Image: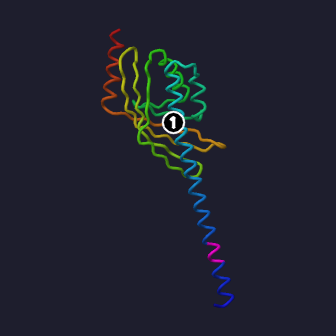
């Protein structure tokens, strides 16, 4: 083989090896980001479970850790509300809730640089004023990288007919009181 051809082959091999290493590094970075978002979702759910079960957790501060202050949350019943309204609604609800549990099902995360989304089913089970409420809440979160972490910049929850029927029954009971 000619020396020039050998040198060219060596350069091509080095370039291919480096781009393969870079691709592996990028894939690891994307997976690390995706895992960080999965951990954020789980951590938020765990924090809410502790707060709704009587542990001394300031829910306003808890939400501030995870959510961008400018977020508008699209609720399961189709309202959009700013974060301050969500905080207020949660503060009013806490005294009425007991035996709260939640679980996250089918958590999927996709990362695109400094933006990511998470989709999952949030199941919440609790007693509200002593009556059981079992919620099925398909959830989508849009997140943005902020420094070393992530903030939720959009949240959207949907629900199923059975959960809506439970909401209606709660409102009817409240109207009769």
Q: How was this image coloured?
A: rainbow
Q: How far across and how far down the image is residue 91, in percent?
A: 52, 19
Q: Residue at x 58, y 62 (%)?
A: 23
* Vertical comparison of 71 with 30: above or below: above
* Vertical comparison of 126 with 42: above or below: above
Hey, which residue is sitting farthest front in the picture? 1
Q: Is residue 12 magenta?
A: yes
Residue 137 versus residue 35: which sits nearer the camera? 35
Residue 22 lies left or right of residue 142; in this view the side is: right
* Vertical comparison of 145 with 99: above or below: below
Residue 110 versus residue 102: which sits nearer the camera? 102
Residue marked by disc 1: 42
Where disc 1 sits, the SS reads: helix
How would you classify the magenta stretch by its main secondary structure? helix
Q: Is residue 66 magenta?
A: no
* Vertical comparison of 30 with 74: above or below: below
Q: How far across and how far down the image is residue 76, in percent?
A: 41, 31
Residue 94 versus residue 23: which sits nearer the camera? 23
Q: How far across and how far down the image is residue 4, in percent?
A: 68, 87
Q: In the picture, residue 164 is in which quadrant?
A: top left
Residue extent of the magenta highlight: 11-15
């Amino acid at each position: 083989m000619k020396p020039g051809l050998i040198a060219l082959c060596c350069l091509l091999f080095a370039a291919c090896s480096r781009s393969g290493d870079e691709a592996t590094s990028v894939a690891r970075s994307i997976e690390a980001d995706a895992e960080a978002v999965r951990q954020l979702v789980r951590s938020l759910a765990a924090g809410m479970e502790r707060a709704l079960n009587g542990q001394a957790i300031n829910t306003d501060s808890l939400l501030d850790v995870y959510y961008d202050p400018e977020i508008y949350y699209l609720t399961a019943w189709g309202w959009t509300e700013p974060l301050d309204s969500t905080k207020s609604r949660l503060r009013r609800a806490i005294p009425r809730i007991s035996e709260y549990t939640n679980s996250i099902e089918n958590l999927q995360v996709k990362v695109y640089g400094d933006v990511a989304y998470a989709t999952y089913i949030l199941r919440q089970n609790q007693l509200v004023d002593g009556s059981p409420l079992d919620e099925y809440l398909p959830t989508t979160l849009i997140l943005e990288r902020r420094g070393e972490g992530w903030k939720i910049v959009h949240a959207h929850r949907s629900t199923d007919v059975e959960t809506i029927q439970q909401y209606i029954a709660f409102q009817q009971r409240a109207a009769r009181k």
